Image (cartoon, rainbow, N blue to C red):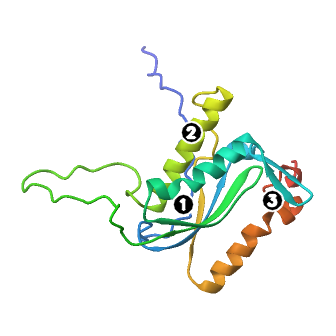
């Protein structure tokens, strides 16, 4: 009598992340966006809040400087309100129309397949945030001599700003973020232990 075939142990399927993106929305189109990006494991790597004022450390200053460089690499981007917090950033950015410095697409030769590039569309919010996160990660890892170590969580939160009133409310929220740090759910001191 033969023994039953053995099966490899079943692996749990990777956890599906729920996307916060608007279905069918083109994140490369003109618009105002509110973005929050959290550090890996929400570690407080970017500085500290002292007396309701954010004091960035060397890593936090890298984040600030790299954010300020975004328009050099993405000329259709205008940066607005921004703050680096101990374990996350908040920012408002605008994606605007093409400029003379924007890349020019060429028409494909008839009969030539159009290459499909994986990842976010060039000039989209996802592409901009992805290149920002990659640049910060390289710079911080070079400084702390830790190649390949994550700096950021895998994704980010975004919100399409739909009115002037909403823009003003979000700007105020960002400006006042250090004042509310003691109550912020991102503050590790506020995380409830099981």
Residue at the limit of the structure toward the left, as seen here: 111
Q: Residues within 10 Å of mark 1 (few under 14, many from 20)?
A: few
Q: Position of residue 140 (x, y in %)?
A: 64, 36
Q: Position of residue 29 (x, y in %)?
A: 41, 71
**Residue plotted at (59% across, 43% down):** 136
Q: Give the Cα distance between marks 3 and 1.
A: 21 Å
Observer-nearest of 155 and 165: 165
Residues at marks 3 and 1 touching, judged by CB atoms closer than 8 Å: no
Q: Is 74 displayed left or right of 158 in the figure?
A: left
Image position of 185 with respect to 168: above or below: above
Mark whose residue sits in front, 3 or 2: 3
Q: Is residue 80 visible?
A: yes
Observer-nearest of 48 and 68: 68
Number of the label disc, if any, that sits on residue 12: 2
Observer-nearest of 123 and 194: 123
Q: Of callouts 2 and 1, which one flags the residue occurring earlier in the amino acid sequence? A: 2
Q: Give the Cα distance between marks 2 and 1.
A: 20 Å
Number of the label disc, if any, that sits on residue 56: none
Mark whose residue sits in front, 2 or 1: 1
Residue at the limit of the structure toward the right, as seen here: 51
Element at label 1: loop
Q: Residues within 10 Å of mark 3 (few under 14, many from 20)?
A: few
Q: Give the Cα distance between marks 3 and 2.
A: 30 Å
Element at label 3: loop
Instruction: Please give the residue where the numbered disc 1 appears in the rendered image.
Output: 19
| The N terminus lies in quadrant | top left
Q: Position of residue 39 (x, y in %)?
A: 68, 47
**Residue plotted at (59% across, 27% down):** 147
**Residue plotted at (34% across, 61% down):** 102
Observer-nearest of 188 and 103: 103
Q: Quadrant of residue 182?
A: bottom right
Q: Of callouts 3 and 1, which one flags the residue occurring earlier in the amino acid sequence? A: 1
């Amino acid at each position: 009598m033969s023994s039953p075939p053995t099966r490899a142990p079943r692996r749990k399927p990777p956890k599906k992340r729920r996307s916060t993106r608007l279905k069918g929305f083109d994140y490369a189109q003109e618009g105002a966006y509110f973005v929050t990006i959290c550090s890996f494991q929400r570690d407080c790597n970017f500085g500290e809040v002292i007396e309701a004022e954010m004091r960035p450390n060397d890593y936090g200053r890298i984040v600030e400087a790299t954010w300020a460089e975004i328009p050099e690499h993405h000329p259709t981007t205008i940066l607005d309100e921004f703050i680096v917090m101990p374990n996350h950033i908040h920012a408002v950015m605008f994606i605007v129309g093409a400029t003379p410095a924007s890349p020019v697409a060429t028409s494909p030769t008839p009969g030539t397949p159009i290459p499909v590039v994986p990842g976010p569309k060039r000039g989209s919010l996802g592409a901009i945030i992805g290149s920002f996160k990659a640049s910060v990660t390289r710079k911080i890892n070079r400084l702390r001599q830790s190649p390949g170590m994550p700096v950021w969580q895998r994704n980010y939160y975004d919100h399409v700003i739909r009115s002037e009133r909403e823009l003003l409310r979000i700007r105020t929220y960002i400006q006042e973020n250090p004042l509310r740090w003691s109550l912020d759910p991102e503050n590790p001191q506020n995380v409830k232990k099981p």
